Image (cartoon, helix red, strand yellow):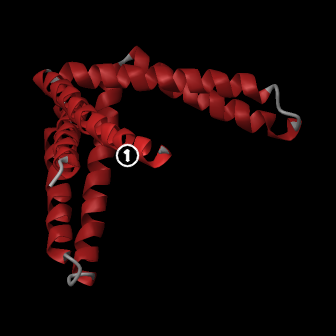
């Protein structure tokens, strides 16, 4: 008898799962579209949120440093906490300037990772190397576009990246939910 009770419960779980995935996807898509609507505002808000998180982490590290049983690491932990707090303070105090500097670092990382992917594509051509090559070229071009548009690119790059990420992740969740729904249907 317990076995027959478990079967409907498993079907209910799959049923709930597909619509929850789809709903999450729709929420992420709407959030992505809202962020993309004003990438500059999203960039500023992102810098402030990261800054507040760093401030909290810095203060927590400083407080925790005094609670350690080994006093030999206190100075290092205080230094780490202070650096977190200073970085967070800079982000909160001037999110536009901080975004411009972070965008410059992001562009450099895109170009560097793109170059590495191009070399890896040649080395591993038989394992979908063409896709890795394409990915590397897109990374290099994206980084160069950001460099060429800098410092203005600092105003919109992070907002655009967050919006695109939310949108694409939302589409994945919707498609995942629809796939789960089709798999849960009786044949």
Quarter assignment of residue 28: top left
Q: Nearer the viewer, residue 41 or 185?
A: 185
Looking at the rendered structure, the secondary structure element under dot 1 is: helix
Q: Which residue is mark 1?
A: 7
Q: Residue at x 16, y 50 (%)?
A: 142
Q: Nearer the viewer, residue 123 or 131?
A: 131
- Across and down, in percent, residue 146 comes to 18, 43
Task: Please indicate whether residue 27 sits to the left or right of residue 101 in the image.
Answer: left
Q: Residue at x 20, y 50 (%)?
A: 143
Q: Nearer the viewer, residue 6 or 77?
A: 6
Task: Please indicate whether residue 65 sits to the left or right of residue 30 in the image.
Answer: right
Point out the image quarter for the C terminus: bottom left
- Across and down, in percent, residue 168 comes to 18, 41
Q: Residue at x 28, y 75 (%)?
A: 120
Looking at this view, name the residue that lies furthest to the front.
1
Quarter assignment of residue 34: top left
Position of 158 relative to 3 (above/below): above
Position of 25 relative to 34 (above/below): below
């Amino acid at each position: 008898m317990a076995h027959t009770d478990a079967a409907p419960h498993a079907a209910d779980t799959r049923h709930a799962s597909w619509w929850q995935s789809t709903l999450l996807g729709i929420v992420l898509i709407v959030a992505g579209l809202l962020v993309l609507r004003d990438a500059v505002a999203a960039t500023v808000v992102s810098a402030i949120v990261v800054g507040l998180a760093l401030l909290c982490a810095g203060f927590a590290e400083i407080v925790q440093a005094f609670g350690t049983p080994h006093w030999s690491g206190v100075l290092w932990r205080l230094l780490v906490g202070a650096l977190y707090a200073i970085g967070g303070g800079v982000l909160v105090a001037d999110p536009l300037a901080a975004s411009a500097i972070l965008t410059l670092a992001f562009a450099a990382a895109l170009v560097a990772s793109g170059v590495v992917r191009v070399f890896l594509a040649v080395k591993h051509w038989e394992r979908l190397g063409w896709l890795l090559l394409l990915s590397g070229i897109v990374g290099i071009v994206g980084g160069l576009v950001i460099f060429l548009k800098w410092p203005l690119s600092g105003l919109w790059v992070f907002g655009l990246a967050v919006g695109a990420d939310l949108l694409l992740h939302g589409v994945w969740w919707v498609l995942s939910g629809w796939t789960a729904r089709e798999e849960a249907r009786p044949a």
